Image: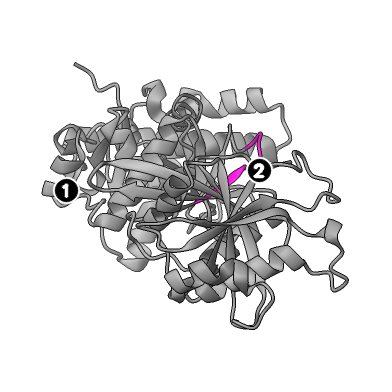
Amino acid sequence: METHPSYPQLSLLVSKYPSTAGSLFQTYNDLLLGKFYNAVKSQQWRDLQIVDLGEPCNRASLQGRRPAHIAVEDVDALLHVVPCFMSETISLSWISDVFKALSNPESIYLAIATEDSSIVYYKLSSGIVKPVV
Amino acid sequence: MTQTRIPIHIANKRAFVWDVEDLVKLRSQHHICGILVGTLPHLSQQNVFLGVPLVLMPEEAVLLVEKEIAVLVDDPNAYPEPTPTQLEKWMSEQEYIVQRHQALFEGNLKGNKETKASERAMSEEAVRKRKERELRRQQKALERQNSPLDLNSDERPSSTTVSASAAPAGAVASLPVSAENEENNSSFNVIVPAISSSMEWYSPKGRTFTSIESAKEAGVWDYPSDLHDRARCGVFRDLWEQGYFMGGGIRFGSDYLIYPGDPLRYHSHFAATVIDSPISEIRPMEIVAHGRLGTATKKTHLLCGWDDEKKQVSYFSIEWAGFG
C-alpha cells in the first residue's frame, strides 16, 4: 500500500486506524479512479476528502461529489461514503454512531469491500424513506 | 355492560376470528388484515378462494388486546354440556333445516315451480307424512341390523314452529347421504355454523381475557415470550400507530410488508426486518441482500431496531446506491 500513488493522502488515517485501513484504501481508489481504465478526469468523483470519524466509530470516512457526467438529481450534493469490510460485524448502534459523527446527514453510503477487491455500495437513510419510483 | 370488543378465539395458542362482521371492522377501522385460511372440506387443496376463519399474527392479536379493541376467548373451554332442553331445541332446528332442504330438492327434481312445490312439501300434512316415512324406515333398519340406538328414531313431540335463527350464516358442508331405503334419496346439507353464538350453550363469558397478562397466567396465550417477540411486537405496534397496513414479508425476504393503504389497493412500498436490539450483530452481507432485493422489487428495505430499555423503534432505510 505504501508504494501506491494514493498513499500520501491516506497515510495519516491508515496508521491511525489500521484495522480498517484496507477498506479505506480500496474505497478511496475506487471512487477516485472509478471503473474506467482510461481514468478520464471527468469520470471521477470530485472533491474527494477523507474524514476522521473519531470515537466511537474509530474509522475514516470519505466525502465527495459524484462524477458530473452521470445524470442524477442534485448531482453536486456532498455525499458521505463509509467503508467497511464484508467480514466485519456491524449493528444499528454502529450505524447511528456513524450518522452522529457526520452530524446527522439524511443518508450515507456504506461501501462494503470484499477480499476479491469488489466493492458494493448501499445507501442507508435515517428514518422511513420511500423508494424512488 | 355488554362486550363491545371483538372476540379473538384462541385455540392452541393461535388467534382466530370467525365473524365476518368482525373481519370487516378489523380491516376497515383498525387496518389489521390477517389471513383467511378456511377452505372446503371436500376440496382442501383449493386455495384460490379462502374463507373464515381469519388467522391473526400473534403481534396483531397482542396489539388489538393492548389497544382494547379485542379480547381473547379461550374457545375450547367455552362449550359446557348443553342442557337437555337446549339439545332438544337444537335437534329440532336441525331437523327442520334438513326437511326444508329435502323439500326444496324434491321440488327441483320434479321440475315444478320451486315455491309451489316447497310450499306443498312444507305443509303440515307433508311434514307429518315424511316423519312417518322416516320412522318406518328407521324401524325397518333397526330390525334388519339390530344396530345400536339411533338418535333419529327417538320419538319426539314434533314442532315445526322453530325460531328464525335455525339457519345461521356460516360455512356449508355438503354431505351426500345415501338413505338405507331407496324411497327417499334426496341429499341435504349439514350446516356447520361459523359463529358459535348460534348455539345456546356457548359460554365465552367466563373464558374471556381482557389483557395479555391474564391470558398468559391462565395458560391460554404465551406471546411475547422473549426479547425477539417483544421486538416484533414493538416494531409492529409502532408501524401500526403510524397508520400502515402490515402483511407477511416472507415473499420479499423480510418480516413484514408495509402498505400505505389497503393491500387490495396498493403495492407495498417497504419490506421491514425487525432487529432485536441496537447491539444485535448485523453482517454487511445482510445489507447487500436486503438492499438488492428491495431495489429489484421497487421497495425500500427497512431495518427496524427495537430498544427494549427505551421502548422505542429506530428506522434505517436501505437502497442500492446505483453506482459501484
Q: Nearer the viewer, residue B94 or B234?
A: B234
Q: Nearer the viewer, residue B251 or B215?
A: B251
The quarter of the image holding the C terminus of chain B is bottom right
The quarter of the image holding the N terminus of chain B is top left
Q: Residue at x 31, y 57 (%)?
A: B228
Q: Is residue A133 above or below residue B24?
A: below
* Amino acid at pointer 1: Lys
Is disc 2 surrounded by few (<14), some (14 to 19) or many (20+) residues within 10 Å? some
Is disc 1 surrounded by few (<14), some (14 to 19) or many (20+) residues within 10 Å? some
Q: Position of residue B14 (x, y in %)?
A: 33, 51
Secondary structure mainly formed by the magenta segment: loop
Residue A93 included in the magenta stretch of the image? no
* Magenta range: B264-272
Q: CA distance from mark 2 to mark 1?
A: 40 Å
* Amino acid at pointer 2: Pro
> Label 1 marks which chain's residue?
B
Q: Which residue is mark 1?
A: B216
Q: Position of residue A106 (x, y in %)?
A: 55, 40
Left/right placement of residue B286 relative to residue B226 reads right
Element class at badge 2? loop
Q: Residue at x 56, y 34 (%)?
A: B103
